Amino acid sequence: MSKNIQNVAVIGAQWGDEGKGKIVDLLCEDFDVVARYQGGHNAGHTVKFEDKHFALRLIPSGIVHPNKLCLLGNGMVIDPDALLSEVASLREAGVTIEDNLLISDAAHCILPYHKALDLAREEAAGEAKIGTTGRGIGPAYEGKVGRYGIRIADLVDPDVLKQKIEFACAERNAVLADVYKKDTFDPVKLYEDYLRYGEILAKRITNGTVWINEHIRAGKRVMFEGAQGMMLDIDHGTYPFVTSSSTIVGGVCSGLGVAPKHIHKVIGVAKAYTTRVGGGAFPTELDNEHGEHLRRRGNEFGTVTGRPRRCGWLDLPVLRTASIINGIDELAVTKLDVLDEFDEIQVCTAYKVRGKSWSTFPAFAVAHHDYQPEYRTFKGWKTSTVGITHFEDLPPQAKDYVRFIEDETETKAAIISTGPRREETIVR
Ligand code: GDP
Ligand code: IMO
Ligand code: MG
């Protein structure tokens, strides 16, 4: 990537799992720092190259590259137990994790009662459940916004930690026991566990905002790695079927303490079709053999939970919305190869909802069967694009398909991905 562009954000332009991990890994060579700014171990980012396969959850995908510094930003919610097991399994796979991994002291902690509440609520909600990853993400962000959350800095401050855990745990226990009839947690045990996490993590804890801004000032190049996708954003997504963080590029500013002027390029990652895990509107969902084909061929099963992902055709109103909100400069279109076998491929150009036509995603909450998608039909290319690395080598119909996406979103598809591995990519 051109040296004139110092810092780049890579964000999901759909409902997550667009292939952000692959794109971050691909581009990371030119960067010094890779930083996450939101979310937690609800994320699952896959990186594959040669015969290697990594599934990252909390740790930025840059970690698999030697000599890249990785930061977990203040906007994240971190389960220390999950972090330590991720570190252990990466080390087992031969990844060096020494002083290349840092954690912002202002990031928030996930505690076991957050996870228990997440699960209890989902169970109680029945049909109306969100379909969360059950990792305690929502309740941890609630604690943060409610101003009684436990921050990473508190882990190394025993008195503060003890008092904060006692206070938060008492309230959460009451809700767990009284409202949901679930087991409660012993604050003393939690305090001891989290104090121990603090001791183990202490050397990685830093003022993330100062740290990243010092690196930017020194001319180091930073990649901001988004988790989830734009349609799961707490403000701009399909609320309430969203995650609890700012997944959009604006989240970089609050989630790392980085000023907007330091974000020089935004890459939106989008599959050549659409998937979503969990509940909520999905206008182009295919509840038929085409959806099944996408799931099988695209291996659309969650990296984190193993849940089958819902699959459907490409949704241009979603991409246009993502483009507006994130100021997307370039698209990375992934999984083009998954469409190889279709006779016909459809692309949603707009939908009719409540008698009105929409070319961007409407904010009101409606169920997906309320949408009437308008489709443009493309002839399939019926030949393998797997591993193609030059745009000219794509079959003509696949080129038309990509050009159509570019025209409709007014954005260049600077990267086209033709397989899960780093090597299977077209960079234009
Ligand atoms: P992320 O959460 O955005 O990083 O995406 P995930 O890693 O959860 O899901 C993307 C999945 O698609 C992973 O299994 C990747 O290995 C795979 N993948 C990424 N790009 C491609 C591609 O171009 N073709 C195919 N067939 N698979 C891909
Ligand atoms: P990556 O980074 C896809 C979804 C869940 C659920 C909703 C809320 O791999 O793209 P949460 O546990 O966050 O409270 O769940 O958000 N979700 C994701 N879907 N990819 C993800 O991450 C997701 N992280 C959360 O399925 O619908
Ligand atoms: Mg994922």
Image (spheres, rainbow, N blue to C red):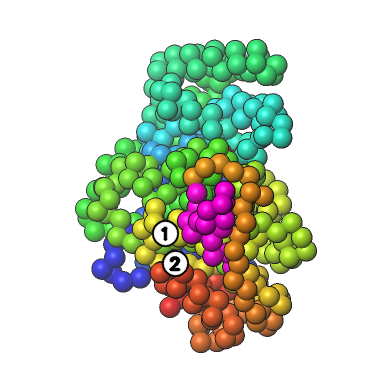
Q: Quadrant of ligand 1?
A: bottom right
Residue placed farthest to the right in the image? Answer: 289
- Which of 322 and 384 lies nearest the eye of the viewer? 322
> Magenta segment, which residues?
347-362
Where residue 99 appears, x then y in whole percent? 40, 47
Residue placed farthest to the front in the image?
A: 355
Residue 145 coordinates in the image, percent (x, y): 42, 27
Q: Is the CB of mark 1 within 8 Å of ligand 1?
A: no
In this rendering, the answer to whether 99 lies above or below 139 is below
Q: Answer with left or right where residue 263 lies relative to residue 91.
A: left
Q: Where does the image place residue 130, in percent across and percent down from the top left?
A: 63, 38
Q: Is residue 404 visible?
A: yes
Q: How many marks?
A: 2
Majority SS type along the magenta span: strand
Quadrant hosting residue 150: top left
Q: Residue at x 41, y 72 (%)?
A: 412
Whether residue 39 can be seen here:
no
Quarter occupied by the N terminus: bottom left
Q: Which residue is mark 2?
A: 409
- Quarter of the figure with the C terminus: bottom left
Separation of disc 1 and disc 2 at Cα?
A: 7 Å
Q: Which of the 4 image quadrants contains residue 211?
A: top left
Kindly identify the amino acid type of the residue bearing the numbered disc 1. Ser
Question: Above or below — where is 96 with respect to 52?
Answer: above
Which amino acid, by three-letter code, is at mark 2?
A: Thr
Q: Which residue is mark 1?
A: 323
